[in-house]
Structures are given as C-alpha cells and as structure tokens.
Image (cartoon, rainbow, N blue to C red):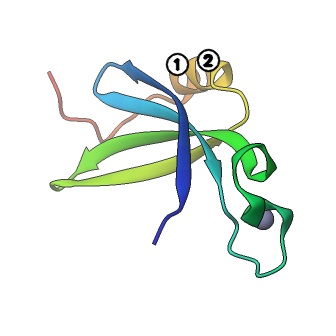
Amino acid sequence: MSRRLLVEERTIGAETFRLERVYCGKPKCKCLAGGAAMHGPYWYAYRRVDGRMVSTYIGRDLEVIGSKRLRAGNPRKRNN
Ligand SMILES: [Zn+2]
C-alpha cells in the first residue's frame, strides 16, 4: 500500500512525473502527522510497463533528469 500525497504532476513524452510527499511507514515518525510533516516532496517517474504503472524514484530535483537521460539514453526502447 502506498500512502502518497500528490503535490504536482507533469507529463513529458510518454512519462508522467509526480511530485509527492510520502509516508515512510515507521510507527513513530513525524510523517504520520501528514501534510508538510510528510517526507519530501520527491519526484517520481511513472510509466506503463506491460499494462501496469511502474514508479521510479528521481529525487528532490526534476531538472536533473533531462540531462541525465540525454547522456544515458535508453537502448531497450523500441519506439521508432
Ligand atoms: Zn516518516
């Protein structure tokens, strides 16, 4: 079960990026208070893999992902 609070959402190409605050699941953590006490917000990339949504942790800064992807590329991608 994921307990996340959506802060912002962006769609870039086939992927959806979501800025979310999260609960870590620890029983006495401050994040249980909710809202601004939750962890993050952190960016996650969501994409559809074999019919289901898969999320990938990015971090606090979404801007890094553009340059990172340009360098790394994606050799398994079969589009085009
Ligand atoms: Zn916590």
Question: Pointers 1 and 2 in contact (CB under 8 A)?
Answer: yes
**Quadrant position of the N terminus in the picture:** bottom left
Residue at 56% across, 18% down? 66
Residue pointed to by mark 2? 67
Specify whether tag 1 is near ligand 1 (CB below 8 Å): no
Residue at 71% across, 27% down? 61
Q: Quadrant of residue 31?
A: bottom right
> Dot 2 lies on which element?
helix
Label 1: few (<14), some or many (≥20) within 10 Å?
few
**Quadrant position of the C terminus in the picture:** top left
Residue farthest to the front, as pictured: 33
- x and y, in percent, of residue 42 in the image: 67, 40
Residue farthest to the bottom, as pictured: 27
- The amino acid beneath tag 1 is Leu
Task: Depth check: give the residue in front, 26 or 80.
Answer: 26
| Mark number displayed over residue 14 | none
Residue pointed to by mark 1? 70
